[in-house]
Amino acid sequence: MGTEIDSIRFEADAWPQFLKRLEEETALLRRKVHDGAHSDRSAVGGFEIEAWLCDTDMNPAPRNTEFLDRFGSDLATMELAKFNFELNNTPHPLTGDAFAKFAAQMHEICRRANETAAEMGLRTVTVGILPTLKPSDFCLQNMSEMKRYRALNEQIFNERAGRPLLLDIAADYDRLRLRHDSVMLEAAATSFQVHTQVPFERAHHYYNASVLASAATVAVSANAPFVFGKRLWHESRIPLFEQAVDSGEKRARVSFGNAFVRENILECFEENLDGYDILLPILFEDAAPDTFAHLRLHNGTVWRWNRPLVGFDEDGTLHFRIEHRVMSAGPSLTDMLANAAFYYGVATALMQRLEDGTPPCRFEEARHNFYASARHGLGAEVVWEGRMQPVRRLILETLLPMARNGLEALGIAASEIDRHLAIIETRTASGRNGAAWQLAYADACGADMTKLAEAYWRNQQTGAPVHTWENR
């Protein structure tokens, strides 16, 4: 969520002052782009892993302040709920042995996180939605100690005129209806977020490619079939997060977006300015306009599933990134690295195709594909090249070869391509992603969420990919 603030309430003049600075910074961004004052570095990748702290009964443990103090690394940060935290890595150019470097660093940081939690008598878990959750876990007492979170909660409910949030997720097997009086339900959804820095001239093509890839990446990575004991979507994070921060505005704060970007990636930032109310009118008095502090804060309150970001190279040069937010955390680090490789490869190949011609489906079809895959996982039916087909067939026959071509174009080592795409291929062919494993466990062993979470955690400790896990 970013920078801490001094107060959770704002004076009436904070909104027009913030809007003025947001307009100025958006105009400045346009000018810098027009003048070519931006980075040309291509294909730099990085990750964020959101995770859970649990006690030995696999219930969420609201102790992230102590955990982060003990961990003592700026690569581990706070999340909305006291039982969540985030692990980050050091970005690397996406070429050569990039995935070996990613793996080495992430294995080490995850090892340290596990050891730190164990010293506290806790466990760390990466899963899209922890199966043992109860609605009572999402009280304001379990909100992390940052005023920024409380301010966001207050402003969302100001936008809603005090009306409670309604969570309503209907599935083939069950339905969850729940009213809630805070945005804390957002904390039930934890993700594996993948970033890609691309040059401005290609950023809109990469954004559109990420939109097109989303159905396949959410299908292979689905890992959230249970919410409060109810069997819902294979990737229930998607409807849960969309409804958990529903501000009641005309345009949803969390969404798949409204259309492909047409000319350049600035269209998304202009849509932010024109289409979304300011939630956090925090004034950065000492920030120079070319740090884009207000623009980046406002952008951080619009959660597209594929979100453009403004950042800076090490020398301070402006750059653009695309944040792919659709994938669940877990099941294993091995799985997440394979997911990232698949995404980078498919998005790169699709970007090249979009630069040369037309997309393989319309935006409305891409949106249908995304929600079908979120609902049914690897059992979804999607539209591609004008015909409906199983998403598994699309992945195996079309997208895996495309991913290989994309990774080869990036210059990723052949051994790394083979290793990671083989995991995606076997997982897809077997139909065994994280959601399928959880559902199979419940079918075989009963819908005891504590036992399911315990078995999931034991398997996760092996580091093996989920398609090899046993249902015990």
Image: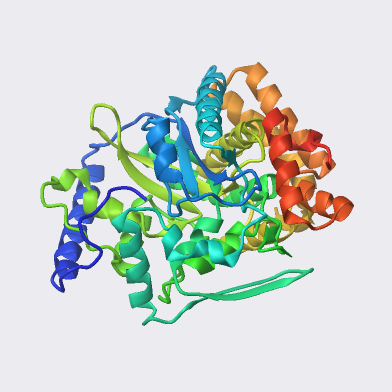
Q: Is 96 drawn above or below residue 362 in the view shown?
A: above
Q: Nearer the viewer, residue 401 or 44?
A: 44
Residue 150 visible? The answer is: yes
Q: Coloured how? A: rainbow
User: Who's the residue at 80% across and 46% down the image?
Assistant: 393
Quadrant of the frame with the C terminus: top right
For residue 404, what is the image quadrant?
A: top right
Where residue 67 appears, as percent x and y from the top left, is 44, 38
Residue 198 visible? The answer is: no
User: Who's the residue at 21% across and 61% down the image?
Assistant: 7
Where residue 173 appears, as percent x and y from the top left, is 79, 68
Q: Is residue 172 left or right of residue 443?
A: left
Q: Nearer the viewer, residue 285 or 295?
A: 285
- Count of marks overlaid on the render: 0
Q: Is residue 325 left or right of residue 163?
A: right
Q: Is 357 drawn above or below residue 71 in the view shown?
A: below
Where residue 123 appears, as percent x and y from the top left, is 59, 39
Where residue 300 appears, as percent x and y from the top left, is 36, 54
Q: Nearer the viewer, residue 257 or 168?
A: 168
For residue 426, what is the image quadrant?
A: top right
Outermost residue toward the left?
A: 286
User: Who's the residue at 39% across and 60% down the image?
Assistant: 302
